[in-house]
Amino acid sequence: MTNAPDWLQIHHGHAPLIVSFPHTGTELPASRVGHFVSPWLARRDADWWVHELYTFAKAMGATTVRTAISRSLIDVNRDPSGVSLYPGQNTTGLCPLTTFDNQPLYRAGHEPDDAEIQYRRETWFDPYHAALAREIARLRAQHDTVVVYDAHSIRSLIPHLFDGELPQFNIGSAGPSGAPDTSCDNALTDVVENLCAMSGMSHVRNGRFKGGWITRHYSNTANGVHTLQMELGCRGYMHEPAPEDVDEHSWPTPYDPEHASPVRNTLQQVLGACLEFATRRNA
């Protein structure tokens, strides 16, 4: 296998399932950290503890791909061309200039210019996607069907991004609400949605989060690659302060295994369904 840099963490499984963790990183290079308003602000919007929530994935035989670099430096789940994934809605870009609450991330005059964005692409974005593409190709050589599952979370209440409280489970298959799925077979999303419904917790299919660039870019159902994004409300596995109380002293709160148990149990069933879907297609 190709040697990966320290910030790029890859576990090579052999089951027809890849779990991607594009937003759990919090590392900021020493040469860039002073450009931000504060290190805390540059780390605040991470998908906190999500890679810990899914520790069972490796035991299932899944491959995992994770970047330890903060999404504030460069977001590996955004279209590198700069095209918005959610036209007409507030969102963040490839090298975001603001937080989820629309606060400036950078000190005045330290925002990344075109040359800096290109450097960040070549240094962190491109290697992540080269690794993900390589793992998809490796597993497709062994299996006719592979599922790529993109794992995310976000604070449940962010008025700048969405109204009200976000559902606990947000299933994204790159399709309009109520329409056929685009990034994967409807049969897979049907089972995942049913498992989320059976949990008794709130869920939505292709609601505010329909799947980011990873879900949309790597989907190739005609050639056996089915992709799915799961966005979680953080409240399911950690304790969230009210939006007005989110500060350097209150966020993030620790991962709470006992509190997380119901969500984790459902996620384990969801990954099991992804694996069963691919395995049946490979029979």
Image (spheres, rainbow, N blue to C red):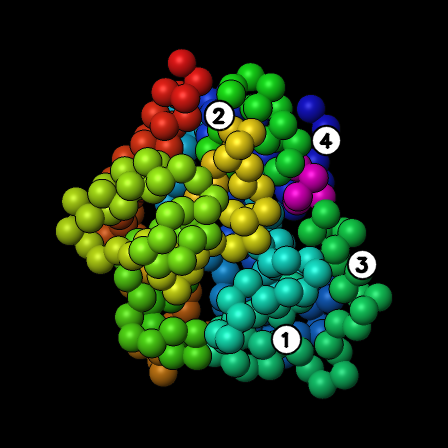
Q: Position of residue 92 (x, y in %)?
A: 56, 70
Please give the residue where the numbered disc 2 appears in the rendered image: 145
Q: Earlier in the sequence, mark 1 or mark 2?
A: 1
Amino acid type at image mark 2: Thr
User: What main secondary structure does the magenta stretch of the protein show?
Assistant: helix
Please give the residue where the numbered disc 1 appears in the rendered image: 97
Residue 186, placed above or below residue 159: above
Q: CA distance from mark 2 to mark 4?
A: 26 Å
Q: Earlier in the sequence, mark 4 or mark 1?
A: 4
Query: Circle 1 sits in a helix, a strand or a loop, which is it?
Result: loop
Q: Position of residue 183 (x, y in %)?
A: 47, 44
Amino acid type at image mark 3: Tyr
Residue 169 highlighted magenta (yes or no): no
Q: CA distance from mark 1 to mark 2?
A: 38 Å
Please give the residue where the numbered disc 4 appears in the rendered image: 3
Residue 220, placed above or below residue 102: above
